Image: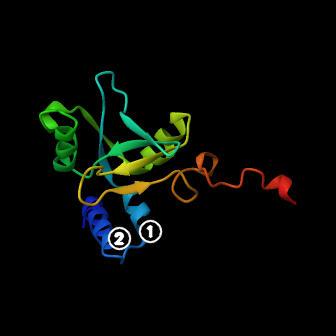
C-alpha cells in the first residue's frame, strides 16, 4: 500500500467516524502532496481564525477542482510543487512567521485540517504549547 493510498484510507475512516487521528497525521507526514504556487513560487494561503492555512492536495484531480474554483483552467493552469507532508509541517509552517497550518483538499468532499497544535507542528510553533512551563511552578 502506498502512503498516498493509506492517507486517503485514513481520511475516509475519519469521515466515517472511525478515524485514528495519530495515524492520519503519520500518513500525512509520509505522503508527498501537491502544493500550489503563485507566479513567484510563493505558496498561496488563506487566513481564518488568526491562522494562515497552506493549501495541499492529495492528487492532481483535487488540485484541479481547486484551480477551477479559483478561476483557472484546471491543473494545467496551476503551478505546483510536490512536497512531503512532514516538510510542510516541520519546515514550511515555522517559516511562515505567524500561526500556520495545512488544509488538505480544500473545497473537496473530504477536506482535512492539520492545525498548528502540539503533535502536528513543532512545539515551538504550536498555538497550544505551554510556553510558560518553567514559570508555572
Residue at 25% in and 62% down: 2
- Residue 19 horizontal/vertical position (percent): 38, 73
From what the image shows, is residue 129 above or below residue 6?
above
- Closest to the observer: 17 or 87? 17
- Residue 86 horizontal/vertical position (percent): 43, 50
Kind of element beneath mark 1: helix
Crowd rating for badge 1 (residues with CA inside 10 Å; few <14, some 14–19, many 20+): few
Residue at 28% in and 51% down: 105
Horizontally, residue 64 falls left or right of residue 43, namely: left
Residue at 41% in and 55% down: 113
Give the image quarter of residue 26: bottom left
Kind of element beneath mark 2: helix
- Residue placed farthest to the right in the image? 137
Crowd rating for badge 2 (residues with CA inside 10 Å; few <14, some 14–19, many 20+): some
Horizontally, residue 97 falls left or right of residue 55, namely: right
For disc 2, the marked residue is 14
Horizontally, residue 73 falls left or right of residue 43, namely: left
Give the image quarter of residue 76: top left
- Residue 106 horizontal/vertical position (percent): 30, 49
Residue at 66% in and 54% down: 129
- Residue placed farthest to the front in the image? 49
Are discs 1 and 2 less than 8 Å apart at CB? Answer: yes
Mark 1 or mark 2: whose residue is earlier in sequence: 2
For disc 1, the marked residue is 21
- Residue 34 horizontal/vertical position (percent): 28, 44
Amino acid at each position: 500500500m502506498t502512503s498516498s493510498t493509506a492517507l486517503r484510507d485514513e481520511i475516509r475512516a475519519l469521515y466515517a467516524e472511525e478515524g485514528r487521528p495519530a495515524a492520519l497525521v503519520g500518513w500525512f507526514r509520509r505522503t508527498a502532496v501537491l502544493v500550489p504556487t503563485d507566479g513567484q513560487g510563493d505558496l498561496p494561503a488563506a487566513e481564518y481564525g488568526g491562522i494562515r492555512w497552506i493549501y495541499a492536495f492529495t492528487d492532481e484531480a483535487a488540485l484541479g477542482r481547486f484551480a477551477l474554483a479559483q478561476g483557472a483552467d484546471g491543473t494545467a493552469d496551476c503551478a505546483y510543487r510536490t512536497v512531503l507532508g512532514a516538510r510542510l509541517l516541520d519546515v514550511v509552517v515555522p517559516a511562515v512567521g505567524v500561526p500556520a497550518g495545512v488544509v488538505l483538499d480544500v473545497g473537496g468532499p473530504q477536506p482535512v485540517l492539520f492545525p498548528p497544535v502540539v503533535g502536528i507542528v513543532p512545539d515551538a510553533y504550536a498555538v497550544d504549547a505551554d510556553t510558560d512551563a518553567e514559570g508555572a511552578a
